[in-house]
């Protein structure tokens, strides 16, 4: 059990997760290392285009050497999707493309239900 615990600690210690809260008015970006000690990286005002915001975000996160990116998925309280859910999914696809071009396939991009967070 001690061996498993050590392996788990080593695995998580190398994680560098970027969290993105995408919105039409502003977008928040934060990082956590090893799953702990989150810190803000930027709050961006709304951009004219999805391409512009994804390019800016990619430029901010590349120096951080992320292992994964988590984008908050806004859902209604009952779990159904909203218009903002669709907008956020389109943003996530654009960001995935931008990140893959800049960082390769080694950085995963995931969506996470942000209800009650």
Image (tube, grey):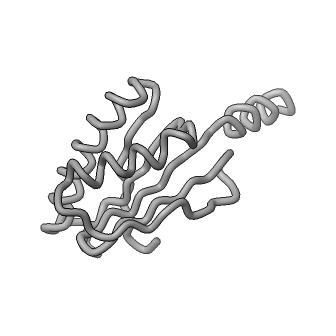
Q: In the picture provided, is 97 more to the left or to the right than 17? A: left
The image shows residue 66, relative to residue 113, as above or below, that is: above
Q: Quadrant of residue 34?
A: top right
The image shows residue 35, relative to residue 72, as above or below, that is: above
Q: In the picture provided, is 33 more to the left or to the right than 24? A: right
Expressed as whole percent of the image width and height from the top left, the position of residue 82 reads 16, 68
Total residue callouts: 0
Q: In the picture provided, is 39 more to the left or to the right than 115? A: right
Expressed as whole percent of the image width and height from the top left, the position of residue 95 reads 29, 44
Expressed as whole percent of the image width and height from the top left, the position of residue 96 reads 30, 38
Q: Quadrant of residue 115?
A: bottom left
Which residue corresponds to the image point at 54% horizontal and 46% vertical from the top-left?
Answer: 17
Q: In the picture provided, is 66 more to the left or to the right than 7? A: left
Q: Residue furthest right?
A: 2
Q: In the image shown, does 106 or 50 lie closer to the viewer?
A: 50
Which residue corresponds to the image point at 38% horizontal and 54% vertical from the top-left?
Answer: 71
Which residue corresponds to the image point at 72% horizontal and 35% vertical from the top-left?
Answer: 8
Quadrant, the N terminus: top right
The image shows residue 55, relative to residue 117, as above or below, that is: above
Q: In the image shown, does 36 or 49 lie closer to the viewer?
A: 49
Expressed as whole percent of the image width and height from the top left, the position of residue 51 reads 21, 48
Which residue corresponds to the image point at 54% horizontal and 60% vertical from the top-left?
Answer: 41
Q: In the image shown, does 39 or 74 lie closer to the viewer?
A: 39
The image shows residue 25, relative to residue 111, as above or below, that is: below
């Amino acid at each position: 059990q001690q061996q498993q615990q050590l392996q788990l600690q080593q695995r998580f210690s190398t994680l560098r997760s970027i969290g993105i809260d995408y919105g039409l008015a502003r977008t928040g970006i934060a990082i956590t290392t090893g799953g702990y000690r989150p810190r803000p990286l930027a709050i961006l005002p709304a951009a004219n285009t999805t391409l512009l915001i994804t390019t800016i975000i990619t430029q901010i996160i590349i120096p951080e050497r992320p292992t994964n990116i988590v984008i908050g998925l806004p859902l209604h309280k009952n779990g159904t999707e909203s218009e903002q859910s669709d907008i956020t999914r389109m943003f996530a696809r654009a960001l995935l493309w931008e990140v893959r071009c800049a960082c390769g396939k080694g950085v995963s991009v995931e969506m996470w239900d942000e209800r009650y967070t």
